[in-house]
Amino acid sequence: MKKLYAIAITTAALALGSFQLQAAETIRFGTEATYPPFEFLDDNNEVTGFDIDLAKAICAEIKAECTFSTQPFDSLIPGLKYRRFDAVIAGMDITPARQKQVDFSMPYFENSASFVAAKNKSFKSANDLTGKAVGVQNGSTFQTYMIDKFEKQGVTVRPYETIQNAFLDMTNGRLDAVFSDTAVANDWLLEQGKGDYSRMGEVIRDADYFGVGYGIAVRQKNPLKSKIDDALTTLKNNGTWQKIHDKYFPEAR
Ligand code: GLN
């Protein structure tokens, strides 16, 4: 009798165990970890940043486990389509071109584009870049914009696997300017530009190229989209989004 009882308990425990395993959904996020303040590696080589904190808060809301894997930016959408991950969070603009391939969550961050150049170059606007070289992140909306709008004007558009390498090449004198997300440009100017560099001209907003803000990409028709949207709405309403924002953008407080 005792033995039977023990077996019953063990079976129940096993059943409960497997139920719990199934109940915890895992969301595998893909990202590109050299894009501060949205995603970057901390001192322990863990990926962190605004996007990562937001993704973790979404997972807590959905009661899912979050994992993150890092890939070059231009391989994130193909990786999503090939199911290497379930969602992409990478400061990614919601654009009409990408919406043909993937679905996006509601916008979670307002974006714009900016040029950065050395102050002593005295460029006034992008029109001064004829005959000059501009660095962009490979696969980014900035690359498409520069090619469409400025290449015919005699601007050389150089793609880089990471925007940090573009900034580095600019400081080494191999690039005249970098074209990137305003928030990322500001972060670089604050952390590394050290007073010798600044934003050039006005910030650019062009929905055809830069879309309507950053979104989290999922595969088309994946019901995960509405779960993420519901979580984002909750996080906006309960102040969590603002808390994460203030952590990574203290100057905007
Ligand atoms: N915001 C840009 C885009 O969506 C670049 C993003 C990035 O390099 N992580 O293309």
Image: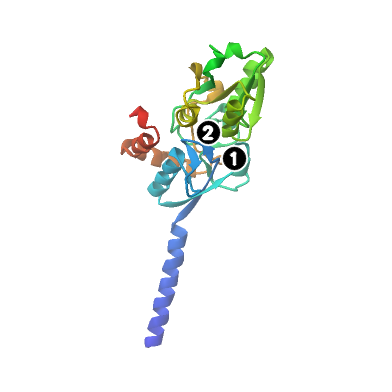
Residue at left 47%, top 27%?
194
Residue at left 42%, top 76%?
10
Q: Quadrant of ligand 1?
A: top right
Q: Is mark 1 within 8 Å of ligand 1?
A: no
Q: Residue 4 is drawn in which quadrant?
A: bottom left
Q: Residue 147 is drawn in which quadrant?
A: top right
Separation of marks 1 and 2 at Cα, in angstroms: 10 Å
Q: Secondary structure at mark 1?
A: helix
Q: Which amino acid is tagged 2?
A: Met
Q: Position of residue 177 (x, y in %)?
A: 58, 21
Disc 1, disc 2: CB below 8 Å? Answer: yes
Relative to 64, is 69 on the left or the right? right
Q: Position of residue 100 (x, y in %)?
A: 60, 32
Q: Which residue is mark 2?
A: 92
Of residue 19 and residue 162, the one placed in the foreground of this image is: 162
Q: Compared to 165, does 112 lie above or below?
A: above
Q: Which residue is mark 1?
A: 76
Q: Secondary structure at mark 2?
A: loop
Farthest left residue? Answer: 238
User: Neighbour class for label 2 at 10 Å: few (<14), some, many (≥20)?
Assistant: many
Q: Is mark 2 within 8 Å of ligand 1?
A: yes
Q: Position of residue 222 (x, y in %)?
A: 52, 43
Split into 4 quadrants, where in the image is the C terminus?
top left
Q: Which amino acid is tagged 1?
A: Leu
Split into 4 quadrants, where in the image is the N terminus?
bottom left
Of residue 186 and residue 103, the one placed in the foreground of this image is: 186
What is the count of numbered marks?
A: 2
Task: Indicate the colouring scheme.
Answer: rainbow
Quick one: label 1 or label 2, which is nearer the N terminus?
Answer: 1
Q: Which mark is residue 54?
A: none
Residue at left 60%, top 48%?
84
Q: Position of residue 13 (x, y in %)?
A: 41, 72
